[in-house]
Amino acid sequence: MTHAPSSDTSTVLLLGRYRILERLGEARLATVYRAVDERLRRRVLVYILRKDLVGNEQIQQRFSVEANAIAQASNRTLLEVFDSGVINDRPYMITEEVVGQPLRAMLPLSVEHALTYTYQIALAISACKARNLPHPPVSSNNLVSIEDERVKLLDGWFIPPDTGPLDLAYYRAPERAAGQPPGPSSDVYALGMLLYELLSGQRLASGSDPWAVSQSHLTLHVPPLTEVRPSLHLPALDQLLAHALERDPARRCPDVETFAQALNTIIRELATETQRLPSVPPVPVAAQPATDQARAAPASPVFKPAVPLPASELPAPIAPAENRLPLHPLSHTELRRKFAQQSALGWIVLLLLLVIVAGTSYFGASYLMDRFFAIELPRPTLPDLGIQLPGWLPGVDRSEVRIVTAADLNVRNQPGLNTEVIATLPSGTRVRVLEGPVIADNIPWLHVRTNYAGRSIEGWASENFLRPPE
């Protein structure tokens, strides 16, 4: 038997297969439930037109069109639609389950997360625009962070429906506030407002109602990111935001695809950015007289004749034999002392050779036993000699070295996105991995340690923004 969801969700079986588990809330057009598909044994979301909108044919038509658009777009940032239709005059849509927090509750984000999420959303909107399909409205309340460093753009249920128009007004382009129809760059403006919010934790527009917020876009001032978050000195990102948030659509980034390409360029530059050594002028080298060894070396492409030394710097000639001082024979005591010194030196060299041979044999045997027979011999701890030793030697620290690829990587006191940030590391910083990875919030975390800005930093960082040295 077919039922529509009621207040008692524990006994509702929708369409004979979807067991309603809980009511999540109301979205812009629909009431949203979490359910179980008893036929396929999987969790799903059920979007069904809100009761107060039943009878409004225009709204019902919009619900159906948007449901079909999401299904046709087939983008991983949008919900995957499993089924749709009408039940008791109420359109419905069955989608994949989404578990996570809205980005609005996680602000501000790190640079790597803010850029990555905005890029994913831009690609999803660009895919919809390419097929002339609508998409869910851009809002930090409509974006849910999920596993694998990904985000979902959906018609969220995280705010009351009566505050939805106010929420969406924060992203409305100035031309729309002026009564003009939206254009290709209107979504660019919304994405620029979103990116600034994700980075700064603040919404640029202000007002007590949707109309006031929309009007504020006509006189909006966009301060540089460093004014609200001093650690974000990213001129290229400031320039992109200024281009995306131009009030005049003709001066704005023309479309979402162009915005996504520019954003991708910044992401790649930040991921590969390294500190450059200051240029040092070449040191002039004084010319030296040619020697037999130099003449035997390969010829230089540019021949420079040797400059002879002045006579005052030439070595003195060897005196003739008759003019030399006579040699005095060594005494018996001096001969014995010389012999003892040479003998001691010989014994020291012999002992060093024996130690090297024994150590090499032991380390080699230890490596072979460990490598081929999984038998670990006792491993002595080698002293810190200030040199880089091979990692396969017993007693050598095997902890890995990684390099930060993000421009502003957060180091946290524990694994997880909701833990305390104890430090921020710039791109190119070398860190040593102590343990991990540990999975938290569906993200692999590594326990790392480094010295930065004159202090020792130890904590947890996302493995996705650390790479081995080349």
Image (cartoon, rainbow, N blue to C red):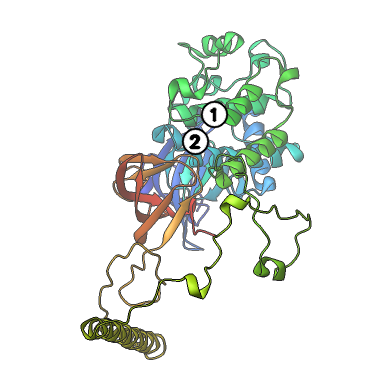
Taking 384 as reference, is 26 above or below it?
Answer: above
Disc number for residue 96: none
- Amino acid of disc 2: Gly
Residue 304 visible in this rendered orientation of the protein: yes
Residue for badge 1: 194
Give x and y (percent) for residue 110: 45, 38
Q: Give the image location of residue 377, x and y in percent.
A: 28, 86
- Which residue corresponds to mark 2? 156
Quadrant for the C terminus, please: bottom right
Q: Say which amino acid is labelled 1.
A: Leu
Q: Nearer the viewer, residue 271 or 67?
A: 271
The vertical placement of 250 against 125, above or below, is: above
Please say if 34 is above or below 402. Answer: above
- Position in image of residue 33 (x %, y %): 45, 43
Residue at 61 percent of width and 38 percent of height: 266
Q: Is residue 410 left or right of residue 272?
A: left
Lower position in the chain sequence, tag 1 or tag 2: 2
Quarter where residue 438 is shown: bottom left
In the structure shown, which secondary structural element does the residue marked by tag 2 occupy? loop
As rendered, which of 350 and 80 lies closer to the eye? 350
Q: Along the horizontal axis of the image, is 276 left or right of 364?
A: right
Q: Nearer the viewer, mark 1 or mark 2?
A: 1
- The residue lying at 40 percent from left, 53 percent from top is 431
**Residue 38: x, y in percent?**
47, 61
